[in-house]
Amino acid sequence: MNKTLFFGLVLFLGLSINCFSQESAAFPLWDKIPGVIKNETYKEELRLDAQGNRTGVRKVSEPTLIPFLVENKSSKNAAVIICPGGGYALLSIDKEGINVAKWFNSIGVSAFVLKYRLPSDDIMTDKTVGPLQDAQEAIRTLRRNADIWNLDANKIGIMGFSAGGHLASTASTHYLDKVYDAKGDLSARPDFSMLIYPVISMEKGITHNGSKESLLGKMASDDLIAKYSNEKLVDEKTPPTFLVHATDDGAVPVENSINYYLALKKNKVPAEMHLYQNGGHGFGLGTKGTHTDWPKACEHWLAANKIIADKSSVYIFSYFKGNGEDGLHLAYSEDGYKWQSLKKDASFLTPEVGKDKLMRDPCVIKGGDGLYHMVWTVSWTDKGIGYASSKDLIHWSKQEFLPVMEYESGTRNTWAPEITYDTKKKMYMIYWASTIEGKFTETQSTEEKGYNHRIYYTTTKDFKKFTRTKLLYEPGFNVIDATILKEDKGYIMFLKDETKVSVQKNLKVAYSDKLTGSYTKASEPITGDYWAEGPTAIKIDGQWLVYFDKYRDHKYGAIKQTANGWEDVSDKVSFPQGTRHGTVLEVSKSTLLQLMKE
């Protein structure tokens, strides 16, 4: 069956992506295998250990791909084709294939284990190109089906172990070789490669003789040996490469990796090599000793080359407790769901400005100048807000009172201020909710003590000079607790509908092309049958995660953006007891380590 049709049918039937994470989901690589010699007696064999566990597969004549897809549908995923080793005579498909694919899934990469044909004159007209045909077609198959499998067609890599490393390096240097009739113009060049204790050369004294004889035969010509000594074929277009080898490898000399690395360096191809003192050959993801660190090093390399998202950051949550008398509290999380307080939940900054000297609703962002900027509510009845800045979230500048509503007579309050930074204009917008007596009387209600908020704003480039305060958002109802973030080409505003008659008390969203508006009509509620306030949001794995204060329930909740709308994930988040209206931001792990010392 045609591969695109096969997966289209699977998706049409509505089967879970998890069903692809099983070996039973393997599918044929070819509709018609090129250069095949039919041989009914040539049957695939399993190699088993003393306990009957599979340790390898021999006599592979029908190549397949085993897909392990990541479930993230909100953004395109990088993908890797994995070529197990085994001297071109066997495939170590579990240790150097399936186990590795599961590891890739854990770091957000889709993986496909390639069960490639093992070279044999019994089933191939030219065994020297059989494995390369499979590798090239695997790369083209991923690009051909990138939309179906949610892959980034520009982030298709290849990984190989031992002889599989020779195949991966061959695919990386022979991608222009026309080894079969490839219809269309899809490139067979991998975008990156990872070679783990690889066979690279076919040259005497450095090669792995078993791999060489299996692929080229015992009487290989000098030209054929040179052709498949891949260190000689590196040029400036060879893909960026990550190499791992053990110095005491007794099967495949470490010089295979070293010489390939030197060729990459000479041609100015981005490359990274990790050589370990010991480990021997065939350690897979690692057994013991320093070589067990290579998967983490590989993850860092993928992030550094922007193949996967950089996970070297963590999340910080700023919040207040009680009435805000003791000031700024901070918590941290590595996944955005489980939050732990810092400094034993003691205050990092005591409030000093405003009528009531409170520090409610602390909003912290990192600005274009590298500083953390914070604004907060200082009082129930003041006409201004608090402001301070910091380099490290520990040491803060002198607190200032910003009289943002000073010239608006009749102002009753200035609540829940936030800051958003416009990277293009290099400008900060500070915005908040205020009630001005006599305005918007059509939505005024005695139920809320006459409070009838709208969102106002001012802009600044330096927190010294500010533009005159203006109305930012008038949705036709009592609105409070707005937070605005950059999204795609515009901005998204999360806000609270404060209406009590008839009761709303929920969160909604609005959109704008520009930070200063105008913003669209507010959406239908995105929160459930409970009262919610103080939204703050961040994108994790391409999806908005919105936190909010379930203030009547005295706990925090959250909703997650999905393809089908907003899903309540309140049961999956945990915050320090007593957490009140705050903001979330992403910081480096080094920043967190400094905070943890306090």
Image (tube, grey):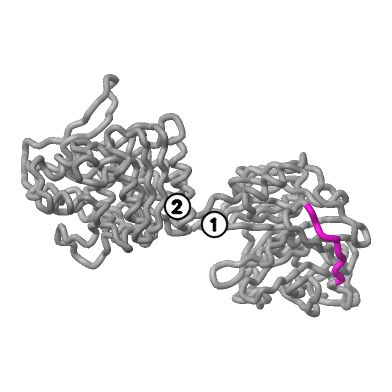
Is 445 or 282 nearer to us in this picture?
282
Is 8 or 114 nearer to us in this picture?
114
> In the figure, is residue 273 to the left or right of 353?
left
* Residue that carries the numbered disc 2 in the rendered image: 302
Residue 591 highlighted magenta (yes or no) = no
User: Residue 379 in the image: x percent, y percent?
Assistant: 88, 60
User: Of the residues under marks 1 and 2, which one precedes in the sequence?
Assistant: 2
Q: Residue 543 carries which label?
A: 1
Is 462 or 57 nearer to us in this picture?
462
Provide the residue span drawn in magenta.
Answer: 395-403
User: Residue 595 in the image: x percent, y percent?
Assistant: 72, 46
Quadrant for residue 593, please give it: top right
Q: Is residue 220 above or below residue 581?
A: above
Disc 2: CA contacts within 10 A as few (<14), some (14-19) or many (>=20): some
* Alpha carbons under labels 1 and 2: distance apart: 21 Å
Quadrant for residue 457, please give it: bottom right
